Image (cartoon, helix red, strand yellow):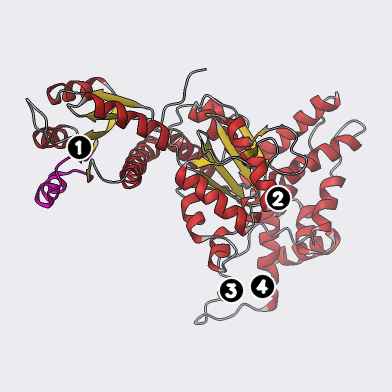
Amino acid sequence: MKQALYPNFGVLLVDDEASFLRSFSLMLETRAGINNLFQCQDGREAMSIIEREPIGLVLLDLTMPHQSGEVLLRRIVEEHPEIGVIIVSGLNQLETAVNCIRQGAFDYFIKTTEEDRLIDGIRRAIRMLEMRRENLEMRRRFMTDTLERPELFESIVTADKGMRSVFQYLEAIAGSSQPVLITGESGTGKELIARAIHDLSGRTGPMVSVNVAGLDDNIFADTLFGHQRGAFTGADKGRAGMIEQAGAGTLFLDEIGDLSQGSQVKLLRLLQEGEYYPLGSDRAKRCRARVLVATHQDLERKQRDGSFRKDLYYRLRTHQVELPPLRRRREDIGLLLEHFLAEAAEELGRAKPTVPRELPTLLMNYAFPGNVRELRALCYDALGQHRGGVLSMEVFRRAVVQSGASATPEPAADASAPLFASDQQLPTLQQAADLLVAEAMRRAQGNQSLASRLLGISQPALSKRLKRSSQPE
């Protein structure tokens, strides 16, 4: 199986000492998982490698024969300003370090400096370069309004512009190794989005999904990290955790907002260090999978009240996708209705029924607390009770009535805002009633039966109001 490369751009090591290049490469691969590496012993050949290969970061020595590192740094900054340069030198001179930073180097490290600081600095540079590339890619996609791989979103039925923007964002961040936080109400399709990210990434391993809600610290650690034989009572044999099963693929953690504080610490260390310890083992393993997480909870509020760690929250939201509820995608309701009825008909071995003309209008005035998942369930229930001819609306009507029948598509952004301007005259009760009736008829697209349900009155009562308001005074 082809090995996944990290990062998605090349890292060029330039140093005239072959032994240092070998040890440096080995350290980067084993300690940081950085394996998209190129080596150069002669500074004069570095520019040709940069022209030929997709280099994004250069780790550069200063003291080299033929061409010094400072000269090469100036050339890279002038000719390829999009490439980051980190100086890794044996010179421990403050003035030299300051000059290199002024000339455009991202950072400066001494070869004898402890490995942890060097690796952290390189990881920081990679994250910065990834985000810079993603921002440029997002700008390009939004400006041109294009999708390069629309076929990977075919499972998500939508014509909504907001969802199209989400797809463009996903394409822009697909190559990143950083975690993605997917938020949205229950039933909005968060797992479908996670699957799309995995497919877009082209990662060589599978996507492994874990619902972490209700897992205590020990079960969470065993599920993700696995265990060795004898790690605990009953561990008669070792077991690979979900991280190892994902390999170089994707690890999707659903309901991350329910994670306990102890498990949050374990996850934070995994994301920061990129390594983990199976239970009962004192040997670290490297995580090669990309981590995606999803929640219907408000993590911003949870981190403010202390129930979710701030450091983990900000680590997870490097990339964030918020899915709109179905009530904000009302133009998709008709498409989804047809899609789910066709899907249910195929699964149940029946012919797809005729949809009543009033049904999409009724559903467009329903708040759908269960979102897309609720609409799918209603379609399957309606088709299960269908006996031929036009599809009955009873299942859908019952859902609207049981929800309170208010069918409010979306609450106002500011519930405390006044309905009427304080400097204007209030309408009379009759005028307000006429406005309410007119709005109900607009939402029901002229259907009196649906409009009367929205108003909470009978259809004959609505008909009388309409006749009375149409009569000239």
Callout 1 amino acid: Pro
The residue beneath circle 1 is 81
Going from the N terminus, do you reach mark 4 or mark 2 first?
Answer: 2
Q: Position of residue 21 (x, y in %)?
A: 26, 27
- Mark 3–mark 1 Cα distance, whole angstroms, equals 54 Å
The residue beneath circle 2 is 215
User: Element under label 3?
Assistant: loop
205 over 124 or under it: above or below = above
- Mark 2–mark 1 Cα distance, whole angstroms, equals 47 Å
Callout 4 amino acid: Ala
Going from the N terminus, do you reach mark 3 or mark 4 first?
Answer: 3
The residue beneath circle 4 is 432
Going from the N terminus, do you reach mark 3 or mark 1 first?
Answer: 1
Q: Are marks 4 and 2 in contact (CB under 8 Å)?
A: no
Q: Is 90 colored magenta in this rendering?
A: yes
Front residue of 309/150: it is 309
Q: Which residues are magenta?
A: 86-107
Q: Is residue 275 left or right of residue 344?
A: left
Classify 10 Å Cα crowding around label 3: few (below 14), some (14-19), many (20 and above).
few
The residue beneath circle 3 is 419
Q: Position of residue 374 (x, y in %)?
A: 75, 46
- Mark 4–mark 2 Cα distance, whole angstroms, equals 53 Å
